[in-house]
Amino acid sequence: MRTSLHLVAAAVAVALVSCKAQDPVIKTVTDTASAMLSDQIAAIDATGKILFPNTITEDGSVKYIGHRDWRVGFFPGTLWCMYELTGEEKWKNEAERFTEALEDVQYLTSHHDIGFMIGSSYLRGYRDTGKQEYIPIIIQSAKSLCTRFRPGAGVIQSWDADKGWQGTRGWECPVIIDNMMNLELLFEASKLSGDESFRNVAVSHADKTLENHFRENASCCHVVDYEIETGKVRSHQTAQGYAHESSWSRGQAWALYGYTMCYRYTSDPRYLEQARKVAAFILNHPRLPEDLVPYWDFDAPGIPDEPRDASAAAIIASALYELEGYSPDNGYRHKADKIVESLATDAYLARRGTNGNFILMHSVGSIPHGNEIDVPLSYADYYYLEALTRRALK
Ligand code: GLY
C-alpha cells in the first residue's frame, strides 16, 4: 500500500483498478459517473468551447469556471479517475483534452492553489500515462507556487493580503489549512527535477502549519495570519467556517489528507501522528452523523438541521484509505468504506439527467459568503472517484 498510491506505474495501476471494478459499489458509482460525465462532455461540446464545470446555479444550470479558479483542474481530474477506474481509452482521451487546455495555469502566481489545479490535471495525467511533455509543466507550476514562499515566515502565502474575503481583511501573510494540499506538487517536482528546493519549501510549510494551525484537540482553524518577516502569528481566523474557533469540516479534511500525503513523501513520524490525531478528532466527534457525512462545520449552531458537506466526506474517505496503508488496524479502511457506501446511496448519488450532470449532491462551498450551499461541487466528485480508485487498490 505504501508504494501503491504513487509509485506503481500508471498503466499497471489502471489495469489493477480496472480488475477490481467488480466491487458493487465501485460498479454502481462508475456506471452512474460514466453516464453523467458523458452527458456533461456532450453539453460542453455543444458550445464549441472547452469549458470547466464546477457547480450549478440557482436555476439548475451548470456553472463553468475560468483558468484562474482553484477548482479548474478537478473536471479533468475526474476524467483521469474514470480512466483509472475503467481502463477505457475514451476517458484517457477526454482527460488529456481537458488537461491540455490548462497549459497556461503553470504560470499562475496570484494565489496558492496551483497545486490543486495542476495536481488534479497534469500530475494525475503524468501518473496515468507517463507523458514526458507534462513534466516541464509540473516543474514550472512548482516554481510558480514557490514565488509565494515567504522565507522569513517559513510558509507559502495562500492569499494576497489585500485580497481577503469579505470581513477578514487586514492580513499580512494569510495561510489557510487548504494549502497543505498544494505541497504534493512540490514533492513531486523535486522527484521529477532532482531540485530539493521544492521539497524544502513543502517541509517548511508543513512544519509551520503543524506548529500553528492546530488546537489541543487536533482540530484546526482555517486561517493563520503571520508576520511576513518573522513568522510570528498575528491571528487565528476563519473565512469559510462558522466561527474563528469552530471546526470547519472541509478544513479538517484538508488537514487529514495533507499530513497523510506529507508522510507519504517524508516518512516523518510527526506527520503521521498528526494525521492520526486529526482522523481521531473527525471520526470520534459526537456531531459526526451516523452515515459519516459531516455537517459543513462541526460546530454549526443548527445541527442537526445544517447542510451536510459531501465534499468533506469524499476527501476524508480518500485520505483514510491512504492512512490505512501507513497505520493499519485502526479501522480507517472500514470508516472510509462506510463513507464511500453512504455517498453511493440515493441520499447523495445523483440520478442521470439531474444535478447538472455532477455525480454527488449536497456539498457546501462557503456558507459565510452565501455561496454554493447544498449543491454539487466538482471537487466532491473528484475526491469521491479518487477514493474509489484507492478502495479498488486494496
Ligand atoms: N480551498 C477552498 C475550499 O476548500 O473551499
Image: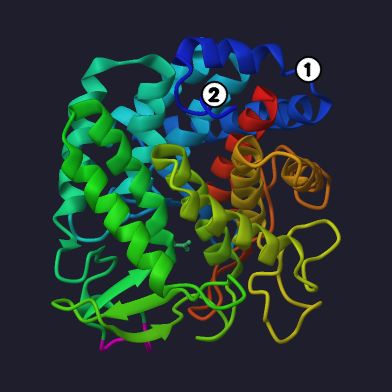
Instruction: From the viewer's perspective, tell me whether residue 24 is left or right of residue 294.
Output: right
Q: Which residue is mark 1?
A: 22
The answer to whether any part of residue 223 appears in the image is: yes
> What range of the chain is rendered magenta?
166-170
Q: Residue at x 20, y 32 (%)?
A: 137
How far is the residue under mark 2 from the one under mark 1? Answer: 19 Å
Which image quadrant for residue 86?
A: top right
Tag of residue 4 = 2
Amino acid under label 2? Answer: Ser
Q: Secondary structure at mark 2?
A: loop
Q: Position of residue 347 (x, y in %)?
A: 82, 52
- Which of the 4 quarters of the picture holds residue 367? bottom right
The image shows residue 316, relative to residue 289, as above or below, that is above
* Residue 303 belongs to the span the image colors magenta: no
Label 1 residue SS: loop
Q: Is-magenta flag for residue 167? A: yes
Q: Who is closer to the viewer here, 196 or 364?
A: 196
Q: Quadrant of the C terminus?
A: top right
Q: Quadrant of the N terminus?
A: top right
Name the colouring of the figure: rainbow
Residue 127 x/y as whole percent: 40, 23
The relative height of residue 153 versus residue 190 in the rendered view (above or below) is below
Lower sequence index among marks 2 and 1:
2
| Residue drawn at (62%, 13%) of the image | 16
Depth check, mark 2 against mark 1: the one in front is 2
The answer to whether 336 appears left or right of 255 in the picture is right
Residue sitting nearer the eye, 88 or 46:
88
Contact between marks 2 and 1 (CB within 8 A): the answer is no
Instruction: Tell me which corner region of the image, top left, top right, bottom left or bottom right, holds residue 298.
Output: bottom right
